Amino acid sequence: MSASTPELDRPAPLALDGPALDPIGGGGALIGYARVSTKGQLLDRQIHALTDAGCQRIFTDKQSGRNADRDGLRQCLDYMRPGDTLVVPSLDRLGRSLQDLVSIVAGLRRREIGFRSLHEALDTTTPGGRLVFHVFAALAEFIRELIVQGTTEGLAAARARGTRLGRPPAMTAEQIRQARALLTRPDETVSSVARLLGVSRSTIYKYVPELGSGSGGGELPAAPTAQ
C-alpha cells in the first residue's frame, strides 16, 4: 500500500533542448519504498527518512511471518516510469536476499529506473553506484554457482554411498514381505491387507506386482502342498 503522501501527478514528459539526461534515473520522480517485517514495528522513521530525501510518493508494506506477499512493492514497481528513481531506507528493506535484491534492481535498470539506498549511500544513477551494483550482481551469481555446485556434489556423494535419492518408498521391505505372506491366506484380500499395513490398494499392487493389475480377486495363489 502507499503511505499518506500527496498523489504525484504525472504530466507527459517535456521535450527539452540540451544534453540528454542519464537514462537510468534522473529527471523523473523520487519514489520511496519502506517495509517492516513484523506487525509490531513502525514505519514512521523510514517514511521520515524517505520524505527528507525528497520522495514525492511512498509505498509501504507491513508483513508478518505468515504473509510473505509484498503488495506495496508490487504497486510501487507498477507505478514507476522510465527516469524515476526508487529510494529505500536500506538495502534490507527491498530484498530478502542478495539474489532477490540484484533481481529487483536489475529489473529497474532494464526499465531505465534508478535506485538509491540511503543507509548504504548507494545510487545507481551515478557511475560509482553502478560499479558497486555490478559487484553485487557478480557476487550474487558467484553465490548461486556455489549453491548449484554444492548441490551437484552432494547428490554425487550420496549416489556413491548408495543413498536412495528422492521420496522414501511407500512400503518397506518388511511390509512387502508381510503383504505377500498375508495375501496367501484365503481370508485376506488386497483391501484388508492395505488397511492392516496403512497403505492404499494401489500401493499394494505396485509393490506386489505378481497380483497383476487388480482386475482379479486380489489374492496370491496359495503355496502348493506336499504330495
Image (cartoon, rainbow, N blue to C red):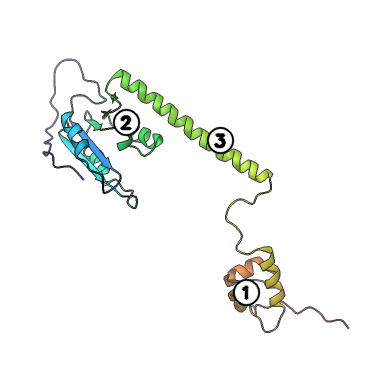
Q: Amino acid at mark 1?
A: Gly
- Structural crowding at the residue carrying mark 1, measured as other residues with C-alpha within 10 Å and reported as few (<14), some (14–19) or many (≥20): some
Which is more foreground, mark 1 or mark 3? 3
User: Would you name the residue on which mark 2 appears?
Assistant: 110
- Could you tell me how far apart the alpha carbons at marks 3 and 2 are, in whole angstroms? 29 Å
Q: Position of residue 149 (x, y in %)?
A: 56, 35
Q: Position of residue 188 (x, y in %)?
A: 66, 81
From mark 1 to mark 3, how far is it between C-alphas?
45 Å
Quadrant location, the N terminus: top left
Q: Is residue 154 left or right of residue 76?
A: right
Q: Quadrant of residue 189?
A: bottom right
Identify the element where label 2 is drawn: helix
Position in image of residue 32 (x %, y %): 21, 35
Q: What residue sits right under mark 3 in the picture?
A: 149
The disc labelled 2 sits on which kind of residue?
A: Arg
> Which residue is depicted at the point 11% across and 33% down?
11
Task: For residue 94, say whether it is visible.
Answer: no
Is 149 placed left or right of 88 in the picture? right
- Location of mark 1 (residue): 214
Badge 3 marks a residue whose secondary structure is: helix
The mark nearer the N terminus, 1 or 2, is 2
